Image (cartoon, rainbow, N blue to C red):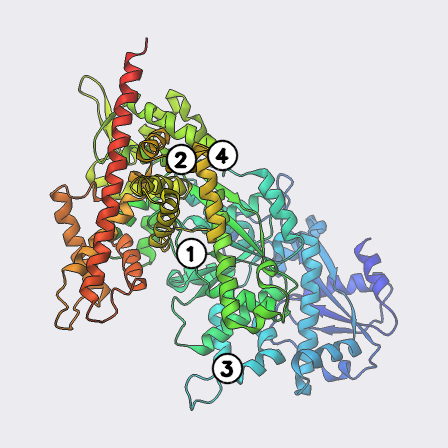
Amino acid sequence: MSEVGELAALLDPGSVVLVQASTPTELRLIQERVAAAGGPGQPLVSLGPAGSPGASLPADVLDRDDDTALVPVRVAWLPEERSGRRTARLADMLPGRDPYRPSERQQQRILARQPGRAKVLVGEPATIGSLRQRWTEATGGDDPDDFGAYVARRATLALDRAEYRLRGPRYKTPSLVKEEILSSRRFRAGLRDVRRGPDADPPSLEEAGEILDELAAGWSRRLIDIMPNVGRLIFQRGFDPQIDYDETQVERMRAALARQPGIFLWSHRSNLDNLVLSAAMQEQGLPPAHVFGGINMAFGPMGAILRRAGVIFIRRSVGDDPLYKYVLREYVGYVLEKRFNLSWSIEGTRSRTGKMLPPRLGLLSYAADAYLQGRVDDILLLPVSITFDQLHEIAEYADYARGGVKKPEGFGWLYGFVKAQGARHYGKIYVRFGEPVSLSSFLGPPGGPVALDPAARRLALQKTAFEVAWRINQGMPVTATAIITTILLAMHGTALTFDEIRLALADALSYLDSRSVPRTASARALSAAEPVRATLDALRQGGLVTFVGDGREPVWLIGPEHQLAATFYRNSAVHFLLDTALCELAVLRARDDSTDPVGAFWAEIGWLRDLLKFEFYFREREEHRRQVQAEMERHDPDWESRLRSGPGAADALLAEMRPLVSQVIVRPFVEAYRLVADVLASEDVTAGVDTLADDAEVTRRALGLGHQYVAQHRLRSSESVSVLLFATALQLARNRGLFDPGEDLPKRRAAFLTELRNLLRRIDRIEDLAIRRYIQDASTRAAAP
């Protein structure tokens, strides 16, 4: 239907046209369309410019009969069509160049030369009576003077919806958020219950409004077009221009977002992550999502620009401000209630170790509130993994792991970050969308048991978050970089020839095939020689791998100074190898138990799971037991009978398991724990004074002890000497009660150290077996004709 026909169908003799015009040209265009639609005498009432927050209707309009229909009208301007697309360009960021909001003179020029770029939009009409009823339900109707502003907001939102239909789902963005939230009866009622102290008065609407000003993000349509392209300009300086997708996953995501509002929850390895995800969503035609970011990134004019690009800046710590927490929760609920999408890192911060961090529940709990309060039918949690062949940031992460201080963000930091992207070629970027998780499937119906029991609610949220994180991990493809660095790190600084690297690769690739582990195209190609050389060359250019080529045979190694940085890539795949490593250690423990070897196997699995629970994601115990069972049956379906047959059969079973990985996967974490345990056990607390209650002091001593042990070759490599791993070790120590006072505290600490030393001895035995096997395989291959 034409614009005139659509308008004519909605106008009747008693209706009032609500005009939202920013210029005389827009007003004249609307008047012409209304006249052409058969309404030359139709009352026209101005709403002011589009998006005007203070707009209100005069009382003489609202005093009309309840059956009077109000018809909102606005002019939408389209960008010039180029190559079949109507989008803003980077040049349109210059002042006065916004194609979506042209100046008066530009509008006149457009109408003279390209009149098709001007569209008169008609919002869904509503009667005064129906609006008054909805106003009373939403606000309580306590302030009659507010009704005019409410109607103006409804008209604006109706025109926004008409504009979404014209422009497409990428341009569906919230408007008048602050005004809508502050006028809500539910918001005002909840605000009266907020207290910043036992005797404090409830906060004012003005105080809440100031926090909303800090939070509320808008969307400039030209920034919707341009910001993903700006992101591409940054990351394409160092990466292949085309992001790698799984098209089946993209279509599944598209279908999911058509049903429910979604929250993109992504792995966080780099400051490029959000730029990459925004560009990916634009390329795939997915609707935009408001992304949460730390307020530390809102420096200078960048903060204002990014807010207009949909970034919601939140404070890093809000635990001591109940008003901020309340406003943030209501803001999240409002955005989801209006069916807009959200996006944030489920880890809350960048992982500087390469493996996923424990999920943060704060924002997710606010989304759960919106669902349990019945504000949305359901919310889809959308797992996203973002993987890079290489990253320049790993040098920063390694420095941080050695005890360095994080540099504050600012323009100098931003310049250095962008410049670093062009320093060399970093390879490809891979984006994978996991199977969506329905929030309702974990929380049950609104008003159900989970909604009424805080403990049950928190447990359900934890399970939900871990399920999302699990799906992110399982969908994260293993890169060629990860495989090669894992092999070289296993040598603890000893160099390998090209043939030796390929020999180790044969076992690794066979293992990944048997487990159906997702891999990038470059990782799948490592069975051929040329891709192996290309990966080694890329790692040499990145400074991680050292090449020695002036001898009889060229060799490659990762030296001690680069091992900490290289672990980032190894750790990106460690979760795929974890169950195999646990099985190796459990078989070794079962070998030494003649009474009940199978029982000893499962006891060891449980003990290792508890030891590493702050380091890795584990499924629930029964599900994890089934995974371990399947892993053992992959090696030998009759594994339990063989364990019961005695130490010799257990040795044979372990010798057949390949590749052996516990010395590569588990050792670095256990050695880091051992350093912390060593520091704790050496403290004299017999006098009842524990000077190590401060984590910083424990970390300082553990770093020093680690440097000593590396120099004495009492540690296999320097990668265990990391404040990042010490942080988890301290978390485990507190969980074990090793900071709880008591006369037996020295015994508890000594026992923990003994446990770790014994575990490291078992890992040593597996490493010795792996070395013997490797030498045997190399000899066999050399002797082959």
Foreground mark, 2 or 1, reads 1
- Is residue 156 something one can see in this rendering? yes
* Contact (Cβ within 8 Å) of mark 2 with mark 3: no
Residue 467 located left or right of residue 753 = right
Category of crowding for the residue at label 1, using alpha-carbon neighbours closer than 10 angstroms: few (below 14), some (14–19), many (at least 20): many
Q: Which mark, by number, is residue 347?
A: 1
Q: Which mark, by number, is residue 516?
A: 4
Disc nearer the start of the sequence (3/1): 3
Disc nearer the start of the sequence (2/1): 1
**Where residue 762 sits in the image (x, y, percent)?**
26, 42
Disc nearer the start of the sequence (2/3): 3
**Where residue 98 sits in the image (x, y, percent)?**
56, 55
Say how many tags the image has. Answer: 4
Distance from the alpha carbon under mark 3 to that under mark 1: 33 Å
Disc nearer the start of the sequence (4/1): 1
- Which residue is depicted at the point 65% across and 81% down? 139
Residue indicated by mark 2:
427
- The amino acid type found where label 4 is placed reads Ser
Distance from the alpha carbon under mark 4 to that under mark 1: 26 Å
Distance from the alpha carbon under mark 2 to that under mark 3: 50 Å
- Which residue is depicted at the point 46% across and 78% down? 323
Foreground mark, 4 or 1, reads 4
Foreground mark, 3 or 1, reads 1
Q: In the depicted view, which residue is nearer to us: 360 or 514? A: 514
* Contact (Cβ within 8 Å) of mark 2 with mark 1: no
Residue indicated by mark 3:
206
SS under mark 4: loop
Distance from the alpha carbon under mark 2 to that under mark 4: 24 Å
